[in-house]
Amino acid sequence: MSGQRLSVLVVAANASTRWAGEAILPLHIFRGLRKAGHDAWMCVGNETKPELDELLGADAQRVSYVEDAQMHSAFRWIQPCIPSRMDNPLYYTQVLATQWRQRDVAAQLVKKLGIDVVHQPTPISPRVPSLLVDLPAPLVIGPMNGGMEYPPGFRFLQPRGLRGVKNLARGLANALPRRVDAKRQAECLIVANQRTQDGLPSGVRGRIFRMVENGVVPELWARGLADGVADSTTVNRSFEIIFIGRLERWKGPEWLIEAVARACTQVDCKLKIVGDLQGERQRLAERVSKLRIESRVEFLGWQSQERCAELLSKADIMVLPSVLDAGATVVLEAMASGKAVIAVKWGGPADILDDSCGILIEPRDPARLVADLEQAIVSLANDRNRCARMGRAGRAKVLAEYTWPMKIERFIEIYREAIGRRAATYI
């Protein structure tokens, strides 16, 4: 089986480069498998079909779509009214509705196309059941990443009663019989860390692997690099800070604005904020105005990956003061761009960053977080050679551990393990 070309079906509720979060993961896997010479196929919901037709070219014929149920329209109407997609139970209900329709389609595709292994990379939450039960091919699920809670000093951000709802949902997931939860049937499961593994339903039988779910295409994030070296040593210009992400409160753009307001009294610095969220951009702009730092802060709204790469190439550092990011892809993207990173020592950034390539801040409470962000910004603005060293170390770490070609190679190893485990059950 070693070296043999595999036929892989990637199954996910959504696949898109334009949606935030996990929707891009199936696309990375599908395209990575195709580039590596494997016979990859994909089964997704039909909402992003126009984008995929344009993006994939001839490979668009390798995508099968599941029609939306009537409830999907209602969910899309309700979604803008809910502050956070990650905390929205309706989102996962929508995902499960798509999965319910995908199960029969996936089973038919396995038989029709001679699929060797089915890979379900999303949803990444370990708590959400998989409905791809009893498939006629081995199943790999993941990489999953979740089980996140707010740091104790930030639990005020959690909607009232949400923890109880989550605990109830987890209890219900654990109570599901094996025949209706494919996570208990899967030959292999991939988790990002121990926290995520602890969030899996009880009674899983498959082999568990460790892998961070996110990765980068290094060529995309190489802009502004000369021989792999980021130029952060020019001292006769403003020290440029960039934030990239949805403007959720827990991602910390407001705390970063407060820190920049303090830092700019000591060093010449500016902040660019990339991202949007209904209502939040206006609220943050009003805070900027109240602090009288309009000349120091620029709101750029949502931007494409290509534009984000360009903006990162011109920045000195990327700051992500998030207290609830399980994955933090933007940290990897900044590192791949040769930029030093300031982030909170919690969740995904704590799994990725170290002292050689960034500054991790303990999440004690908002007031101390703002003070620590200010101190970190000032220290790097006053030592741009240190900034450049961190940027070089970050890019080297990404190239050594987090590129998509490397991750695809690891997936292939896991697929072969899954095929072997399925075969062993029939001997």
Image: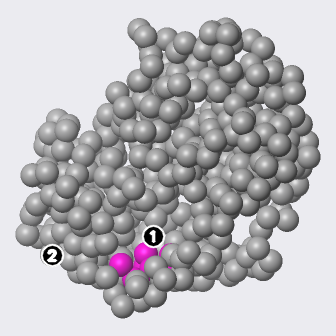
The magenta stretch spans which residues? Answer: 92-98
Q: Name the quadrant of the C terminus.
A: bottom left
Label 2: how many Cα within 10 Å (few below 14, some 14–19, many 20+):
some
Nearer the camera: disc 1 or disc 2: 2
Disc 1 target residue: 184
Q: Position of residue 95 (x, y in %)?
A: 43, 75
| Circle number at residue 224 | none
321 in relation to 169, above or below:
above
The residue drawn where x is 13% and y is 51% is 57
The x and y percentages for residue 364 are: 88, 46
In the image, residue 379 lies at what x, y percent?
A: 80, 19
Disc 2 residue type (three-letter) = Gln
Mark 1 or mark 2, which has the lower sequence index? 2
Left or right, 301 with respect to 298, comes to: left
Would you say 258 lies left or right of 285 here? right
Of residues 177 and 65, the one nearer the viewer is 65
Tell me, yes or no, if residue 239 can be seen here.
Answer: yes
Q: CA distance from mark 1 to mark 2?
A: 22 Å
Q: Quadrant of residue 342?
A: top right
Residue 399: quarter of image: top left
Residue 276, above or below 106: above
Closest to the observer, 152 or 24: 24
Q: Secondary structure at mark 2?
A: helix
> How far from the left and from the top, in percent, is residue 83?
65, 70
Pointer 2: what residue? 108
Residue at the image point whose x is 58% and y is 19% from the top: 391
* Amino acid type of the residue tagged 1 in the rendering: Arg
Q: Secondary structure at mark 1?
A: helix
Neighbour tally class for label 1: few under 14, some 14-19, many 20 plus, Cα within 10 Å: many
Does residue 29 belong to the magenta stretch? no
Q: How many discs mark residues in the rendered view?
A: 2
Check the image and report above or below for 357 versus 17: above
